[in-house]
Image (cartoon, rainbow, N blue to C red):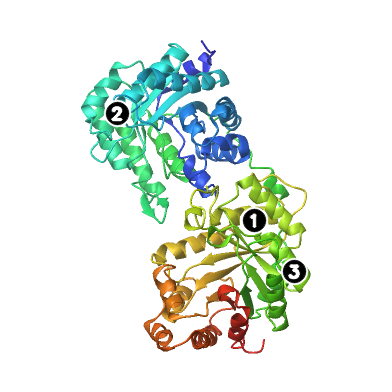
Amino acid sequence: MPAVSTTRAQEFRAQLARRAIVADGAMGTMLYAKGVFINRCYDELNLSAPDMVRQIHQEYVKAGAEILETNTFGANRMRLAAFGFAEKLAAINEAGVRLAREAARENAFVAGAVGPLGARIEPLGPTSFAEARAIFREQIDVLLDAGVDLLILETFGNLEELHQAVFAAREASGPEMVIVAQVTIDDNGNLLDGTETEVFTERLNEWPVDVIGCNCSVGPKATLETIERMMAHSSKPMSAMPNAGVPVRVEGRNLYLCSPEYMAQYARRLLWAGTRIVGGCCGTTPEHIRLIHAEARSLQPTQKNLAVTIEEPRAKAHAMPPAPMAQKSQLGAKLAAGKFVAFVEILPPRGVDASKEIEGARLCAAHGIDCINVPDGPRASARMSSQVTCQLIQREAGIEAVNHFCCRDRNILGIQSELLGAHCAGVRNLICITGDPPRMGTYPDATAVFDVDAIGLVNIVNNLNHGLDIGGNPMGSQTALLIGVGANPGAVNIDEEVRRFEWKVQAGAEYVVTQPVFDMALLEQFLRRIEHVKIPVICGIWPLTSFRNAEFMVNELRVPVPEHFMERMRRVDNAEKSRQEGVAIAQEMVRQVRGMVQGVQLSAPFGRYQMAIDVAQAVEPR
């Protein structure tokens, strides 16, 4: 039997008998807010980004949390195998305990977090009870050996699965270890399979666990109502860790809307009802826990002052002041000076011969274009890397390049490496984008990475510009990368588009390039919505090549094209006139936006660079 920290377990029991104890809030929410994308294995961050995990734990201790859950919710063999990390199970769980302990010191108890397997067990699935118990036991053994003070089995929606986790935990730990068993419920207080509150409470009451309760799925109101009903069927201490409300799904992001003040009100009610452990789940932050802790202190005698001191990341003191925009690149200097700029987009070559692209860049330079904008794997196809293409263009054509940098193909370590390389290679201008999923391109079986999205990428670049890596550690030197981002004035959900744009600016964006714009009303609306954000806006302009091209823009790329432009393209009767009409429309757009934005990005459809140059003639002398 693994050794356990009986002294701390006994201390926890004694504390629980005297008073309510405040747990921490969400780990996943905080990691996501720091730029870690949702399809990442959050448990593995214990190894690859330990400083980030430790800092979150420290923030919760500073807010008043007295229980820190290890970042091991999904660190069982079955869940880790889905990410290719099954063989790192022991290392991930050991690191999770160590990081929580380093943050807790003597000021908080460390709870080993254990979640469901992520698969159905018998009779509804292929995993037997014995297999499920063995998988839980493997993880729990590591947590106990690493020295947790208690175990929290949480977010279980299936009683049989929780049953196996409970008995695996008790077999592994013996009678001394404190075990908390929590289920996840719906708005009516039932398990997700329909099991009613009274039924699952009576089952939990029979099992060898010390505390029972609810976490996740619902907000504080439904949690309180369920806890009150559970108390009628069990005398065991209760725990409650609700979400910050029911999440609202907006373009792939879960937004939790309950304020810290609202959560604190319900914490008070839970404490009045007799709940012994109060904390938070998805959507809750250190600010939520700070107010919950204040409520707990006001309702009961507190421990002696533990003189909590939390180490702020040392790296903050070593952060270097970033280079001013004007010193980062020629483009940065022009934008800082308020100069109107023009980009032309040139795709990377499909093979190793970039002579056509270099010649096109030379042509643009000869006609006064400021920069060549190079997409990163456009439409998820196989092309030369955008960074190398930028280097070739800058060296061979004598014109500065802007490197699209997307998150699809790189993990956070690769992202940092390539950004450092870009700086050293002299490619200083970026546009940070999330990127198209591979299934949108030629290779539907290709996989994506998406460790971060565009917001997280901007955070990474901004860190590097301050001389810090993603974990906030000083590097001894810094990059000077000009941070651009994308935005879509024609987005279906413009509220979410503006919100994400604001987050990008908060993360460190210095200029924005829009998707192609044809509808002036949409552009004007977008500019009004972001007028409080004082960064340069570069408007995307796409010269149409045919009526079919216009239809493609509207129906497949979802770019709104006004009917009067559609009609103009419909009326022309041959290819050359179509291109001429497309250039004329684009020139009209340039003239209209000239006084509204600080530049234009001109596309060169199908490699017709002369079309972009012809459109640029509409830009007044600069």
Q: Measuring from the top left, give residue 540's x and y in whole percent.
A: 54, 75
Name the residue tied to disc 2: 124
Q: Amino acid at mark 2?
A: Leu
304 is higher (above) or lower (below) than 488: above
For the residues labelled 2 and 1, the Cα–Cα distance comes to 46 Å
**In the displayed structure, does residue 489 sit left or right of residue 146?**
left
**Displayed quadrant of residue 56:** top right
Q: Amino acid at mark 3?
A: Gln
Label count reads 3
Q: Measuring from the top left, give residue 143's x and y in whole percent.
A: 52, 22
**First of labels 1, 3 by sequence position:** 3
Q: Residue at x 54, y 60 (%)?
A: 504
For the residues labelled 2 and 3, the Cα–Cα distance comes to 60 Å
Numbered badge on residue 394: 3
Q: Residue at x 46, y 65 (%)?
A: 498
Q: Secondary structure at mark 1?
A: helix
Name the residue tied to disc 1: 461
